[in-house]
Amino acid sequence: MMSAVLPSTDELDEVVRRVAGVDSLYPAGPLLATVVTATVGALTHRVPAVAAVVRTQGADGVRVTARIGIAADESAGEVSGRVHDAIAAHLRQSGDPAVAEITVVVARIG
């Protein structure tokens, strides 16, 4: 039996960036991991590749977290809903067997 290729977090970053109303994307990973990655990048003088949208596979299915910024004239609820729907559609099209949770956090408005 062949397993489906699961979407990378880089693909999910692009999916979220294309949603109308999203004007920025912030790292959604644990704070410690983000700080360590930034510190290593500063010490090595290289910009580390950090995916903003975090995708993990749990026993109950895929969990995705995205932290977004939106323009002041946008509705946080509407933009969050569009991001959620875009992620869910992408996961379905990519063949993910189960989606346990999609979390969209509005980190900045304006």
Image (tube, rainbow, N blue to C red):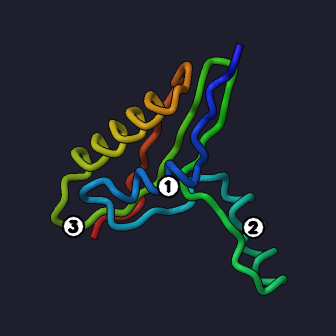
Residue 100 is situated, as x and y percent measured from the top left of the image, at 53, 23
Q: Sequence order check: which comes first, mark 1 or mark 2?
A: 1
* Residues under numbered marks 2 and 3 in contact, where contact means CB atoms less than 8 Å apart: no
The C terminus lies in quadrant? bottom left
Q: Quadrant of residue 87?
A: top left
**Circle 1 Cα neighbour tier, 10 Å, few/some/many (<14 / 14–19 / ≥20):** some
Decide if residue 51 is on the left or right side of residue 22: right
Residue type at tag 1: Asp
Residue type at tag 2: Thr
Residue 13 is situated, as x and y percent measured from the top left of the image, at 49, 55
Name the residue at the left extreme. Answer: 73
Name the residue at the front extreme. Answer: 2
* SS at badge 1: helix
The residue beneath circle 3 is 72
Q: CA distance from mark 1 to mark 3?
A: 22 Å
The residue beneath circle 2 is 37
**Circle 2 Cα neighbour tier, 10 Å, few/some/many (<14 / 14–19 / ≥20):** some
Q: Residue at x 43, y 37 (%)?
A: 90
Of the two numbered discs 2 and 3 in the rendering, the one whose residue sits closer to the viewer: 2
Q: CA distance from mark 2 to mark 3?
A: 30 Å
* SS at badge 3: loop
* Residues under numbered marks 1 and 2 in contact, where contact means CB atoms less than 8 Å apart: no
* SS at badge 2: helix
The residue beneath circle 1 is 13
Residue 10 is situated, as x and y percent measured from the top left of the image, at 57, 54
Q: CA distance from mark 1 to mark 2?
A: 18 Å
Residue type at tag 3: Ala
Image: 53 above or below 46: above
Name the residue at the bottom extreme. Answer: 45
Q: Sequence order check: which comes first, mark 2 or mark 3?
A: 2
Q: Residue at x 46, y 39 (%)?
A: 103
Relative to the observer, which residue lies in front, 12 or 52? 12
